[in-house]
Amino acid sequence: MSLDHEEEIRNRTAARPSIITGAISVAAILLFVGTGSAVLSKTLQYYTSGTEPADRTLVIALLLNVALILFGWRRHHALSMEVQVRAAAEERAQHLASRDPLTGFLNRRSLAEEGAAMFARAQRRRKAMALIMLDLDHFKTINDMHGHAVGDALLRAVAAEIAHAMPPIALTARLGGDEFSCGFLFDPAEPSTIERIAERLVSRMAQPFEAEGLRLHISCSLGIARSDFDCASMDALTRSADIAMYQAKKAGRNRYAWFDQSMERELQVRNELESGLRLAIPRQEVVPYFEQQIDLSTGRLHGFEVLARWEHPTRGLISPELFIPIAEETGMIAELSLSIMRQSFIAARDWDPSLNLSINISPWQLRDAWLAQKIIKVLTETGFPASRLEVEITESSLFDNLALAQSIVGSLKNQGVHLALDDFGTGYSSLAHLRALPFDRIKIDKSFVMSLNESADSAAIVNAIISLGESLNLPITAEGVEDASIEERLRVLGCSKAQGWLYGRPLSVSAVRRLLAERRLLQGSPAPAEKKDAATSQRLVG
Ligand code: C2E
Ligand code: CA
Ligand code: CA
């Protein structure tokens, strides 16, 4: 039974007694009017002039009448009270259904309704409607670190600041989690009003908040869309503001961005990549490429870093910088990574046993409690020795769930897998992080290595990382070695390994086989080259 139908039945049942009560009261009043005056005047005469008393039955009927009228009045009063209470309850229920209980703001559904009305109003009055989408940056960290009570208090404080920044007539909504939205009308000739509001919001959110006795630091990313620029409806306006908000996040957070059409096209490309990637992984179009890692003290080939490439049937070779973030956001990274591992372990089966492989593990994968077991399974199934595998993780992997990361890494290390800290120098570069996991090696980010000879700062950072490695007894790999002078400088500084374009671009499976065959680093007779591409290096698209 639908809710509306139920409601109707309830209303009808409530109305029935009130009709009966009404009918009884009307009848009683008519009777009273008919009999009351005769009985009363007779009774009055009996007491004053001693005439005949009124008929007893009529007196009883009159008393009954009075009782009925009283009953009717009381019942009427009770019923009207009930109607009032019910109306108030209904109003409250409607309020609750349209409001976010935490902040009192509109919820997603009621924003859509009230926004559509405002949108129509804007058109009628030759005004424009602005919609701001606001998302807090890294709010999850606050919730994880301080608990939900603090998170809720912060959301309430944020809501108060948003309400404060809005013009007098504005819609303010919380769409869920840490996502807020506000809409208001403005003069299309004066878009600077909106910019002022956006600037105020961004700068206020970057100031510390007091919540539950704590001082909390956050920031926010804003997307803004306006109804008079290519937005045909409230739905389109919401979507545009949303796209602009993601763009603000992508551009580095703590800022606002206006929607423009190029963002829509970018989103379309991204969606195409996403749906393409879904098919490409099982089809093994995403393949491993191999970048040489050289032992600086001997000049010997130590092994390879495995780098993913998408061999797209029409677009050519696609860079991991384009598709890894999509794989991470959509949860495809686990499948992608295991496929890359399987393909590279199979490729390396008959390589010289002195050669090792380094694999990149995304921070997202370290949320999977079964990651170690999955990697070990691929190692076992392909017969690649765990002792020849190194996993590279970045510092950001340590923020989410350190205990889980420690347990995953513990299981891998028990099997003999090595652990490297990738891109050191770009993140927090904290000593505490270096101690949090049993790293075997530090990799200096290529940005410092590439500018080693030109920038005194880079040289100082590379120097500092190498001495840190020495004192912690952790060997260092430098990536991004593009010329011999940098290689020489790194060798003098005591860096143990190097990789980069000086030694060649990353190689496909077949190109690596040829290289290893030339250097007699294949076990047994050289296997025939695979039919896949024969180029030793390829340009990436994207
Ligand atoms: P990364 O782990 O820091 O990898 C090193 C990147 O630097 C590679 O880019 C490599 O091609 C590039 N590179 C190496 N030597 C030089 C050099 O001398 N000069 C310059 N300019 N660049 C050099 P690539 O292959 O585009 O990979 C980009 C990033 O994508 C990697 O950065 C890594 O974070 C990620 N990635 C690649 N493959 C995988 C994968 O299988 N799984 C995961 N999770 N991430 C991957
Ligand atoms: Ca790496
Ligand atoms: Ca790196």
Image (cartoon, helix red, strand yellow):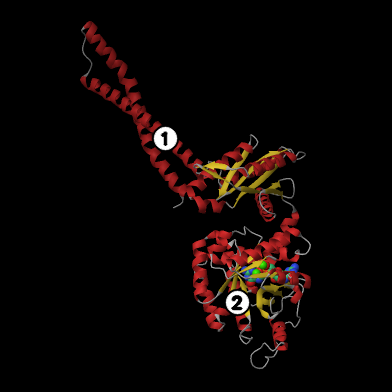
How far apart are the two marked residues, 1 and 2, measured between alpha carbons?
A: 67 Å
Image-quadrant location for residue 527: bottom right
Amino acid type, residue under disc 1 in the picture: Val
Quarter of the figure with the C terminus? bottom right
- The residue most toward the bottom is 525
Return the x and y of residue 115 as percentages of the image width and height: 63, 44
Return the x and y of residue 467 as percentages of the image width and height: 64, 64
> Residue 85 has which mark?
1
Q: Is any atom of residue 483 visible in this view? A: no
Residue found 32% across the figure and 25% down from its top? 69
SS at mark 2? helix
Some atom of ligand 1 lies within 8 Å of the CB belonging to the residue at label 2: no
Count of numbered marks: 2
Residue found 26% across the figure and 10% down from its top? 44
Image-quadrant location for residue 320: bottom right
Query: Where 258 sits versus 501, above or below?
Result: above
Q: Nearer the viewer, residue 38 or 471?
A: 471
